[in-house]
Amino acid sequence: MFELKVEDFGFNGEGIVHINGKVGFVKYVLLGEKILAEVLKENSRYYVLQLKEVLSKNKFRVNPLCPYFGKCGGCDFQHISYKKEIEIKKEILSRQLAKIGIKTNIICSASDEYFYRNKIRLYPSSQGLGYHTDSKIITIETCKIARPFIDENIKAVNDFSKPYLNIINYVEIRTDDKKILINFFVKERFNANFEELSKNIKCNHGIYQTVNNKSFHCYGESSLEYSQELKIKPTSFSQINNKIAISLYRRLCEIVKDKVVANCYSGAGLLSLQMLQSGAKQVYGIELGLSEHLDAQELKNKTKLNSLINLKGDCAKVLPKISRKIDLIVVDPPRAGCDNLVIEAIKDSSAKEMVYISCNHATFARDLKRLENYSLERIELFDMFPKTANFEIFAYLRRK
């Protein structure tokens, strides 16, 4: 056991200490606090420690709302006031930009602290369904960052699932704030009395099973409805914080008027639709996933938007075919960021403007450095994931 002082915080919000000349990382602490911690892992370069006791508290420390905080691995910052959490996230992004030689003003858009998440994923253990930590699964019956319709139905889903834990890979619960969809991702289809589960769900709902990427509707509602035009299937991607997603997309739609846009990683087409409704001249939606592409095509057919052109394929291969027509490129890649071929396709395009939306500040900074023929004009931090160390970045770039 070591008595230590927290000297700084890292890129994931963890506290930084020093032991015997080596750096140590410890979660759930704040700058300046004196703590007792024990070593969980040691190598030649650093220690990973577990907090045992806070001996002197930072003034921004608060009591966590959730009984599983510090155990389930879902949250990083429930011990911090939300104002301070935003400051830490802003500093993390500033440090990433400084590593690539950029110093700029960062605008921040805050969220609701709790009950914001419209999707959760629960994994099976011998005790029931829960969240996946580094080493084990912690069974839960409530989640205070999940939307109320999800939070109040976790226990019912958990109780129902217990006889089937050996064939469940995970369970996903999603909501549009009118209903929930419960999707059992399983090794093989199982027969169950889904009416019995239905009786214990406290809101309108639908139930699915998914095997090998093929979904089977089992009971109740069949889709989520985020707008009159857009209905999301149980496996399609959508942002997990509706309030912040609306704010982020509104920011993008401010700059699309009369422009031809390439929307890379376009998903089910919601953002493409919003850009057209905001005055974009034409939008090419580029998406590799078949399910998302089909959703986008269905959206196009419903709205009769001939100026929406959905192209299925890899952005690196599709973008060069249309690049001479494009005024603005929008990328919203997965956490791994854009691969080299996508970056080269963007650099070789005729697009004078670009928007990069990212949920990973490290890969964002890496890609921004590689886009050397674009300059960063504006950057904004959207807190899509309160109480975690993650956030969304909106960056507007112009060709040099």
Image (spheres, rainbow, N blue to C red):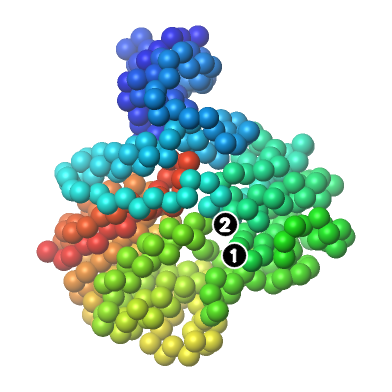
Looking at the image, is 69 positioned above or below residue 112?
A: above
Image quadrant assignment for residue 185: bottom right
Q: Is residue 269 above or below residue 135?
A: below
Residue 320, image quadrant: bottom left
The residue carrying mark 2 is 118
Query: Can you say whether 242 is above or below 86 in the image?
Result: below
In this view of the protein, can residue 106 be seen by the observer? yes
Give me the residue at 63% from left, 53% from top.
Answer: 148
Q: Position of residue 147 (x, y in %)?
A: 59, 53
Whether label 2 touches label 1, CB < 8 Å:
yes
* Residue positioned 27% across, 51% down in the render: 107
> In the rendering, at what x and y percent does residue 106 appear?
25, 49
Where does label 1 land, which residue? Answer: 176
Q: Residues within 10 Å of mark 1 (few under 14, many from 20)?
A: some
The residue at 41%/84% (across/down) is: 308
Mark 2 is on which residue type? Answer: Asn
Give the x, y percent position of residue 43.
Answer: 43, 20
Whether residue 345 sits left or right of residue 136 in the image: it is left
- Looking at numbered disc 1 in the image, what kind of residue is underneath it? Asp
Q: Is residue 335 left or right of residue 302?
A: left
Q: Residues within 10 Å of mark 2 (few under 14, many from 20)?
A: many
Judged from the image, the secondary structure of the residue bearing numbered disc 2 is loop
